């Protein structure tokens, strides 16, 4: 919703219609170049994320109470945490441990017992995050 002086309403409507229904030509040109130009950077980034996935999956798989799902092409890992004593509190506990993950509930009620961890950090930080996650899981079992 917006409030404009009556004299501007028609101009604002035209601006919004063109802005929402058509992309500016420079964006179309950039997208065309990104899709048809050299793909070296895509291959490099894909390899980086695959290496991070291959590092992180075994670290998460060894943690009792967690079941990471192998991503087919995403730069994040979904982790099933429903076996934990208090899965609803786990994401907040991780935040207090310095690990920011996305609660699965952010994506709807089917995600309530999951969290998503992005593979956007360098390997040493991912390893440190996995160690903190493991300690947080152990703490949940101790307090249950």
Image: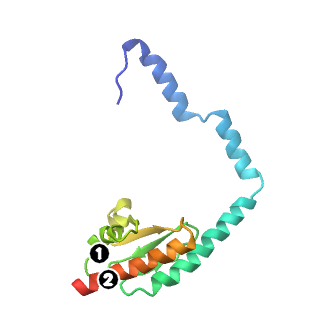
Residue 13, position in %: x, y? Answer: 46, 23
> 10 Å neighbourhood of mark 1: few (<14), some, or many (≥20)?
many
User: Is residue 130 found left or right of 141 in the rendered image?
Assistant: right
Crowd around label 2: few <14 · some 14–19 · many ≥20 (10 Å): few
- Mark 1 lies on a secondary structure that is helix
Residue 23 position within the rendered picture, expressed as x and y whole percent measured from the top left: 60, 36
Q: Is residue 144 visible?
A: no
User: Which residue: 69% across, 43% down?
Assistant: 30
Splitting the image into 4 quarters, where does residue 7 fall? top left
Whole-percent x and y of residue 92? 30, 67
Say which residue label 2 marks.
Answer: 83
Q: Is residue 109 above or below residue 70?
A: above
Residue at image location 38% in from the left, 68% down from the top: 98
Instruction: Decide if residue 17 is on the left or right side of residue 48.
Output: left
As rendered, which of 6 and 86 lies closer to the eye?
86
Q: Position of residue 76 (x, y in %)?
A: 51, 68
Q: Are marks 2 and 1 in contact (CB under 8 Å)?
A: yes
The quarter of the image holding the C terminus is bottom left
Secondary-structure class at tag 2:
loop
Give the left or right position of residue 78, taking residue 46 as reference.
Answer: left
Residue 67 seen in the figure: yes
Q: Which mark is residue 87?
A: 1
**Quarter-of-image position of residue 133:** bottom left
């Amino acid at each position: 919703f917006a409030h404009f002086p009556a004299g501007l309403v028609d101009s604002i409507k035209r601006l919004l219609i063109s802005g929402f229904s058509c992309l500016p030509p420079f964006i179309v040109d950039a997208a065309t170049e990104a899709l048809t130009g050299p793909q070296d950077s895509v291959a490099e980034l894909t390899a980086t994320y695959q290496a991070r996935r291959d590092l992180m999956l075994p670290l998460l798989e060894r943690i009792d109470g967690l079941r990471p799902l192998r991503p087919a092409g995403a730069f994040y890992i979904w982790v099933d945490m429903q076996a934990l004593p208090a899965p609803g509190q786990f994401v907040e506990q991780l935040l207090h441990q310095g690990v920011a993950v996305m609660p699965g509930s952010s994506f709807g009620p089917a995600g309530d017992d999951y969290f998503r961890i992005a593979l956007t950090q360098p390997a040493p930080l991912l390893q440190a995050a996995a160690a903190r996650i493991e300690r947080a899981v152990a703490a949940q079992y101790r307090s249950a």
